[in-house]
Amino acid sequence: MKQWGVCMPKIRRPIAIIGERNINLNLADEVDKDQIVRIGKALSSPVKIEILNLLNDKAMPMQEIAQALDLAISSVYMHIQDLEKAKLVVTETQPGLKGSMRVCVTSMESIYLENRPKPDSSGKTITSNMPIGNYFDFKVKPTCGMADISGPIETYDSPQIFYSPKRMNAQLLWFHQGFIEYRFPYTPSTTLTLKELSFSLEFCSEAPGYADDWPSDITFSINTHELGYFRSPSDFGVRRGRLTPIAWPLGRTQYGLLKTISVKSDGSYMDGKLWNEKVTLSTLNLDENPYISLLIEIKEDAEYVGGINIFGENYGDYPQGIIMSLIY
């Protein structure tokens, strides 16, 4: 039935386009440089930052943004264009009371800018991405446990769960003291000379809940040869990990540090810095076994026994398990 004198407003529908939740960029990657510049331009403007804050939890038409910030609609349009170019905002045309309107939204939660040189690609590199639950051996003491994308696996602080078949789904594992060993398949090349062996993984200390000041001495060994220890400064939990699922609550470990351990002909390195000149590729006797062993340990007599969290590809900040690279 027609109602005289009543103007029925059109309902704003949910915006259909969803932007990037987590933006990952590398200063050393040529592909990322243009977007880094565009993001820098966008974030250098206080007005654009105010617009992002307005859009933090809801979609808004440009007219409402202009009214909220007391700006001309033409000025808002230019700011939104810059934010779109930087992939910080997406827009969509929707029907309004008088024609159409441009609705803006941001789904961006984090921007991660990495300054890590890309690996040398002049030779041949063979990589293996080991799921963190696919360990070969372990001996751990509580606090300890594992989690998958749905949350905790079985029970907390019981070393027995490390025998569970569900460990293969683990995306986060932790223990206070002890060791865990991974074995990666290895077949010696008859035609290529190995120049470097490296392992990349994300990890941090293990505290009750989380703690910014919680050092832990984490020792790494390859084929039973001890390279040294890294002193992790924290159990990081002040923000949600970029990949950590909603099922894993805040107030617990969220993300770690991505570190690279490598062995060359002249010694062992941590993130490209000489770590132990006594352990070299020849020291490891790689041809003796069909595998390469990586042992990660919290020693009982370490100065700081602060445990460890190891992150899989669906927790933390980096979408990977433990990556072994053979560089020829």
Image: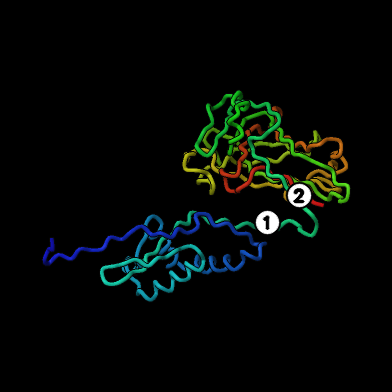
Which residue is more in the foreground, 36 or 98? 98
Which residue is more in the foreground, 64 or 17? 17
Which residue is more in the foreground, 33 or 298? 33
The amino acid on which the numbered mark 2 sits, given as a three-letter code, is Ile
Q: Residue 139 at what x, y percent from top left?
A: 68, 26
The residue that appears at 63% across and 65% down in the rendered structure is 31
Which labelled disc corresponds to residue 116? Answer: 1
Q: How crowded is mark 2: few (under 14 residues within 10 Å), some or many (20 or more)?
A: few
- Residue 12 is left or right of residue 77, and the answer is left
**Element assignment for label 1:** loop
Mark before the other along the chain sequence, 1 or 2: 1
Q: Residue 79 at what x, y percent from top left?
A: 44, 71
Vertical order, 281 against 165 (above or below): below
The residue that appears at 49% across and 54% down in the rendered structure is 21
Give the residue at mark 2: 126
Q: In which quarter of the image is residue 133?
A: top right
The residue that appears at 39% across and 64% down in the rendered structure is 104
Q: Residue furthest left?
A: 4
- Residue 86 is left or right of residue 307, and the answer is left
The residue that appears at 86% across and 36% down in the rendered structure is 288
